[in-house]
Image (cartoon, helix red, strand yellow):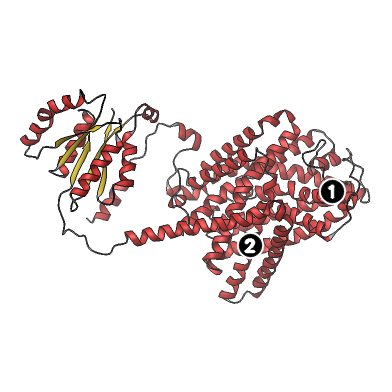
Amino acid sequence: MTLSAKIVTHAESVPAGPSKKTLADYIFGRWLATAEEDEQKIGPLAGVPVLGLDALSSAAYGPEAALTLLLPLGALGLSFIVPLSGIIVAVLLVVYVSYRQTIAAYPNGGGSYTVAKENLGQGAALVAGAALALDYVLNVAVGISAGVGALVSAVPALLPHTVSLCLAILVLLTIVNLRGTRESGLTFSLPTYLFVASLGGILLWGAFKAFAAGGHPVPVEAPPALPVSTETMSLWLVVRAFASGCTAMTGVEAVSNGVPIFRRPTIANAQRTLTVIIALLVALLAGIALLARAYGIGATAPGESGYQSVLSQLAGAVIGRGPLYYVTMGSVVAVLALSANTSFADFPRLCRVLALDRFLPDTFATRGRRLVFSYGVVVLAVISGFLLVAFGGVTDRLIPLFAIGAFLAFTLSQAGMVAHWRRIGGARRSLWLNALGAAATGITLVVVVVSKFADGAWVAVLLVPLAVLTFSRIHRHYRYVGQEVNDSRPLDLSRTTSPLVVVPVQAWNKLTSRGLRFAVELSPDVRALHIVTQETQDDAPCALARTWDSLVVEPARAAGLEPPRLVVRKSTFRQFFAPLIEYVEQVRDEHPSRDVVVIVPDLVVRRWYHALLHNNRGIILKGLLRLRGGPRVIVVNTPFYLT
C-alpha cells in the first residue's frame, strides 16, 4: 500500500468527536463536515434577508438623504423628489439587468472583483476589491448606527447607551453569522418580511387614498410644516440631492458576490433573489417619492429638536399613530440595524477570493466550524466595532464614502462585462446594456465624488488606493516567500554533522528530565544551561551541581550516551532572556559548521486560564530565538502535559 493510501485509510477511520457539548457548541453550533455544505445552502426566500437587507434598508434613508438636501427650497423641493427618484430607479434597473448577466457569466461569486480580474486586469480587480471592502465595512457601521439612531429617537432615555446598543447588535450579528449562512437567513427572515409587508401595506393604502382624493389626500396626522425657501433652485443643488439619493442603490451587488451560497439551480436561484430584491426596492422608492409629494412630506433637520424621519411622517400621515404605525417603525429599526448582515455574508467571501489570489492572508480562505469563512466575519466585526466606538455610534459622516465604494464597484463590474462580451463575441444586446450601465454608474460616481468631496468623500479617494497598496504589498510578500522556499533539488545529505543542543534548565523536575531525554536522542553534544541571579546563586546552582552526576551523568553513561554538560551563567541584573540568547549566539558563532538546537521545555495546563498563573517564558523565548538566532538556530518545543 502506498503512503497516500495509508493516509486516506487513517483519515477515514478517525472516530467522531466527543458527544459532550461544549459552550462553543451551544453558542456557535456543532462542527459541520465539508460534506454537509449543500445542506447549508439557501433558496430565494432566505436569500432576500441574507443578501438583500442592505438594499432594502436603503429605502429608509436614500429618499430622506435627497429630501434633506432639498430643504433650502422649502415646498418647491418636493417637486424634484419624484423625477430624481425616477432617475435613480432607472439607473437601478440598468444595474439590475447587468448583474443578472454577471450572475450567469460568473456563478462562482466574487462579483465586481472577479469580473474586473477576468476582463480588465489585476489592477482594476484590486480597485474593485478595495471598493467592495470599503462598502461592506461602512455598511455595517452605518446600518447599525442608523438602526440604533432610529431606536434612540423613539426612546430618548436610551441615548446615553448608543454605543453599547450598537456593539450589542454587532455581537449578535457576528454570532449569528458564525453559526452559518442558513442560520442567518432563518433568523432575519421575520424582520425582513415584516418590514416589506408593513411598509408596503402603508404605501399601497396611501396610494389608494391619494388616488381617491384626486392626488391631494388629507393626512391622518399632519406632517411638520415645510420651511420657508432660503435658496433658489440651482442645478448644483439638484445634483447634490441626486448624489445623496443614490445611497438607495447600495447593496445591489451583494447577490452577484454571493452566488455560491445558493442551492441548485444556483444561477436561477440567485437571479430570482436579485429580481425580488430589486422589485421590492423599486416599489418602495417609487411609493415613498410619490406619497411624499402627495402628502407634502419633506425632511426635517437631522439632530435638531422635533426631528422625524420621512418614513415616520409618511406612516403617521397615512395611518396615524396607532399599533400598525409602531409595528412598521419597529420593523424599520430592525431592518436598518440588521442591514449589516449583507456585509457579513459577502465580505468574508470577497476576502476569500482575494486570499486565494494571495492578496490577503491565507487564513481568510479557511472555513470555520460552520463552513463559513470565520476569519473574515471576525475581522469585519472588529473593524466595524472600532468605527462605531470612534464615531460614538453616529456614523452619518461615513455615508458619502459608503456610496463611492458601491458605485466604483458597479462601474468596474459593468465595464468588465462589456469587455467580457467583446471577448466571447455575439450577444450585442447584452454588450450595449452593460455599456449603458457602465456609463450610467460611471457618471453617477463622478457626480457623487464631486458633490460629496468636501463632505468626506475625499477620504474614500485616499482609502481605496491605500487598500490597493496593502493588497499589492501582501502579494509581493507571498511572491518573495515562494521564491525563497522553492527548491526542486533532491534532498541534500552531504553534511550530516550532529547539531549542538542547548537546554535551558531552572531546576530538576519532570520538564527538565523530558527536555534532556529528547536532547540526548538528537545529539551527543548537549549543554544544559542554567541562568542564576544574585538572589539564587548561593543556593540553586550548588544544589543542581551536587546532584547533576547522580541525576544525569551516571544514567547517561550507563545507557552508553555522552552525558549533557551543565553550564552555569550568572545574571548580574536578574535577567533571564538576555544571557540565554547571548550564550546561544556564542556557541553558534563558535561552531559555524553546525546547527544549534534549543530545546524549550514547556508546561501545558489543562485550562486556558491556568496559563495566567505561570510566567510563560517558553513562548517569549521561542519568539526571541527566532528573531535573533538566525538560520542555524532551531527551536524545538518539548511539552509536558499536566494530568
Q: Residues within 10 Å of mark 1 (few under 14, many from 20)?
A: many
Q: Quadrant of residue 414?
A: bottom right
Give me the disc on residue 71: 1
Q: Nearer the viewer, residue 574 or 597?
A: 574
Amino acid at circle 1: Leu
Of callouts 2 and 1, which one flags the residue occurring earlier in the amino acid sequence? 1
Q: Quadrant of the N terminus?
A: bottom left
Farthest residue to the bottom: give it: 425
Element marked by disc 1: helix
Q: Distance from label 2 to label 1 (Cα)?
A: 37 Å
Residue 239, x across and y down, in percent: 79, 59
Element marked by disc 2: helix
Residue 257, x across and y down, in percent: 57, 56
Q: Residue at x 45, y 48 (%)?
A: 367
Amino acid at circle 2: Arg
Look at the picture and state if 162 lies above or below 635. Answer: above
Q: Quadrant of the C terminus?
A: top left
Q: Residues within 10 Å of mark 2 (few under 14, many from 20)?
A: some
Q: Nearer the viewer, residue 26 or 438?
A: 438
The residue that label 2 is drawn on is: 100
Contact flag, marks 2 and 1 (Cβ < 8 Å)? no
Q: Residue at x 21, y 49 (%)?
A: 589
In this picture, residue 535 sits left or right of residue 452? left
In this picture, residue 509 sits left or right of residue 122? left
In this picture, residue 372 sits left or right of residue 440? left
Q: Residue at x 65, y 47 (%)?
A: 53
